[in-house]
Amino acid sequence: MIRINELRVGNLLRCNSTKEYRQITITDLLDLSESNDAFDYCPIDINKKILLRFGFSELPKDKKAFKDKLLFQHGENAERILWSGGCVLKPSDNGGYIIIAWNILYAHRLQNLYHAIKGEELGYE
């Protein structure tokens, strides 16, 4: 079950009845606020396909830093953010990484975090 305080208009969720992905609307949020039973959506697990559709690119595995976990980046240079195994990171000035958030396992949480960091929507193609 998704809590309403986790959602924003535009978050990507999966419809339980049709299994299709859909960006939620204000009407969907109002339905959820009135009755959790009527809300026919569930979170989407983050995987390679989802990250690529959000505009991330896959990076070569960094065995030392990420222990063979998949590594993806969005953006370039100092503006880039990385996702690996549920952690969202930014490169630090000393060549390492700063963990911004962890346990980001669902698409809507990644969208919300991206919006909080960048002040813009994370596009889905």
Image (tube, helix red, strand yellow):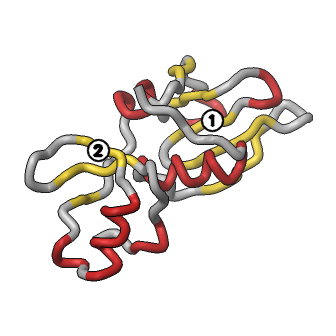
Q: Are marks 2 and 1 in contact (CB under 8 Å)?
A: no
Residue visible at 26% across and 59% down in the picture: 42
Q: Is residue 66 above or below residue 5?
A: above
Name the residue furthest front: 27
Question: Which residue is labeled 1 in the image?
Answer: 82
**Circle 1: residue type:** Leu
Crowd around label 1: few <14 · some 14–19 · many ≥20 (10 Å):
many
Crowd around label 2: few <14 · some 14–19 · many ≥20 (10 Å):
few
Q: Mark 2 or 1 closer to N-term?
A: 2
Q: For this rendering, which residue is in front, 91 or 51?
A: 51
x%, y% of residue 30?
Answer: 35, 71
Residue depth check, mark 2 versus mark 1: number of the one nearer the observer: 2
Position of 51 with respect to 16 (left or right) is right
Residue visible at 34% across and 69% down in the picture: 2
Which quadrant is the C terminus positioned in? top left
Q: For this rendering, which residue is in front, 95 or 42?
A: 42
Name the residue furthest bottom: 34
Q: Residue 27 sits in which quadrant?
A: bottom left
Name the residue furthest top: 60
x%, y% of residue 37?
Answer: 17, 77
Residue visible at 77% across and 31% down in the picture: 79
x%, y% of residue 10?
Answer: 44, 49
x%, y% of residue 109?
Answer: 49, 55
Question: Which residue is labeled 2 in the image?
Answer: 22
How many numbered marks have been drawn onto this rendered protein structure? 2
Q: Is residue 106 above or below residue 34?
A: above
Q: Give the number of the disc on residue 12.
A: none
Residue visible at 29% across and 82% down in the picture: 34
Q: Secondary structure at mark 1?
A: strand
